[in-house]
Image (spheres, grey):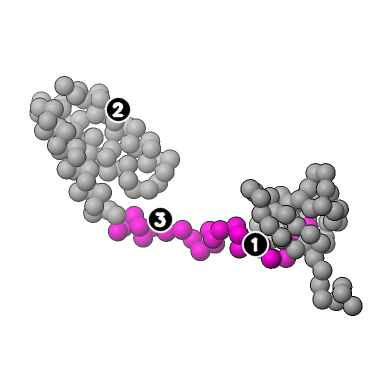
Amino acid sequence: MIDVQAWIFIAALCFLGEMLTVSFFLLWFGVGASVSAVLSYLGFDPLTQFIAFIIISVILLALSRPFAARITKDSPKKATSERLIGQKGLVIEELTPEKGGIVKVEGDTWRAISSQTIKEGEYVFIKEIRGVKLIVEPFKSLDDNK
């Protein structure tokens, strides 16, 4: 027999999981488990508790999916970091081959590495991204080639 404490524990786990994921998925299983805890307290049999848990969770999940999809859309700025390849960045901490440095690109700061030293205040061209680091080289403008 599933007792009140077991349902409360399941509900707490679901609510905690929802706080960590904010997906509006586990929330409804937490609500279903809470209702089942009340049914258990009132003396309903375990089969009724389990059926109520499943029915309530599934109905709430189905009703909330359109709402959840609307409010959890990714912002346009969250595009892949690959969009930075080919961009120009500003060195805000000198880059050295040994320890790298920091580059500012599109308002965000990134750790960067280069095969040569590039001074603070100079511009760089982003060649690729490895993990969370930009691979850069000195920026050559059209004027530099004359």
Q: Is residue 133 visible?
A: yes
- Looking at the rendered image, the disc whose residue lies closer to the viewer, 3 or 1, is 1
* 87 is higher (above) or lower (below) than 13: below
* Quarter of the figure with the C terminus: bottom right
Query: Start and end of the magenta stretch?
Result: 66-91
Which residue is at 38% across, 36% downward?
A: 16
At label 2, counting other C-alpha atoms closer than 10 Å, the crowd grade (few under 14, some 14-19, many 20 or more) is some
* 126 is higher (above) or lower (below) than 24: below
* Residue bearing mark 1: 84
Residue 67 on the magenta span:
yes
Which residue is at 19% across, 37% downward?
A: 53
| Residue 139 horizontal/vertical position (percent) | 80, 65
Q: CA distance from mark 2 to mark 3?
A: 27 Å
Q: Residue 94 or 96: which is nearer the viewer?
A: 96
* Residue bearing mark 3: 72
Q: CA distance from mark 3 to mark 1?
A: 24 Å
